[in-house]
Image (tube, rainbow, N blue to C red):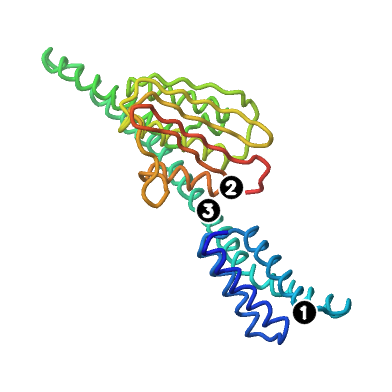
Amino acid sequence: MDTTATDLLDRYQQALCEYLDSGGETALHEAYELGRAALAGGKGLLELVNVHQLATVAAIAGHPVDERTLAKRLTAAGRFLVESLSPFEVLQMGNRESNAALRRLNHILEEEARRIAHTLHDEAAQLLATVYLELSQLTRDAPEHVSEGVTRITSHLDTVREQLRHLSHELRPPILDQLGLLPALQFLGDGFRKRAKLDVTVSGSVRERYAQPLETAIYRGVQEALNNIVRHAQATSVQVRVWTRKGVIHCTIKDDGVGFDPLSSDGRPRGLGLLGIQERVGALHGSLEIKSAPGKGTQLHLTIPLARDW
């Protein structure tokens, strides 16, 4: 047992003995403060329960009593333990509220992305159609050199239209809503293959539909990972794989790039992109694992439990 754990045990045992001998709210408040100290020191529930057991044994062993008195002291020790665990319950409630708020925020962002995608796809397309019509009318009686210029402009507009189409689909791909996760990821990979010249391979065994927040989180995680790879990894190929096992959906994104040191000094993922992925999956009780080293590429592993009510 390290020094910090020994100090906690000593404080806990002293406070428990005082409560068992005299009771009162002051001693119970000390139990709460001990729970807060354990939490701040990085101690888990099992460690605190272990401290409680050791302290209880010591407190009872030092006071030989009859069976009835022993039962009362054990009951009082249980109340002391419950109070010391209260900070952990408060933290858990705060985490649940934070996750719920993050899920609501992600839903709002997805709805906004859907609205923008609709605007790009429909309204921008209508404006382009009007421009095409005007240019077509302009070339009817125009000299040859003007017609050639209009043809060049039309070619540029074709490029703009195609880019707008891809952008609107990636903002909120209709294929994700219509066909599901794997086809949407394959479409996403095709887009990066064409635009960024990145060899993206998408494979998986998922065929059924999952809850919309889960599919969206995986899709956005892969999308952000591919964006990071294009910007920083200097990779030539990426393998994306999705599968389910024992009630959990898994997704790995592995590249052959330059790699990096994945954790900052505080132990959190480096970069807003990776942090965003972690928060998205974390809001659904999932996790993100990063394996990387300079010169050895990078692998992200996203996991989210399936049996959740979001």
Residue reaching furthest to the top: 144
> Which of pointers 1 and 2 indicates the residue nearer the eye?
1
Give how far across and how far down residue 263 sits, in percent: 39, 44
Residue that appears at 61% across and 68% down = 9
Q: Between 92 and 8, which is closer to the camera in this rendering?
A: 8
Q: Quadrant of the N terminus?
A: bottom right
Q: Please indicate whether residue 30 sits to the left or right of residue 162 in the image.
A: right
- Counting labels gives 3
Disc 3 secondary structure class: helix
Give how far across and how far down residue 3 sits, in percent: 52, 63
> Dividing the picture into quarters, in which one does residue 32 lie?
bottom right
Q: Between 139 and 247, which is closer to the camera in this rendering?
A: 247
Mark 2: amino acid: His
Mark 1: amino acid: His
Q: Mark 2 highlights which residue?
A: 285
Circle 2 Cα neighbour tier, 10 Å, few/some/many (<14 / 14–19 / ≥20): some
Labels 3 and 1 touching (C-beta < 8 A): no
Q: Which mark is residue 63?
A: 1
Q: Which mark is residue 104?
A: 3
How many angstroms separate mark 3 from mark 2 (CA)? Answer: 14 Å
Give how far across and how far down residue 205 sits, in percent: 61, 23
Residue that appears at 24% across and 19% down = 155
> Which of pointers 3 and 2 indicates the residue nearer the eye?
2
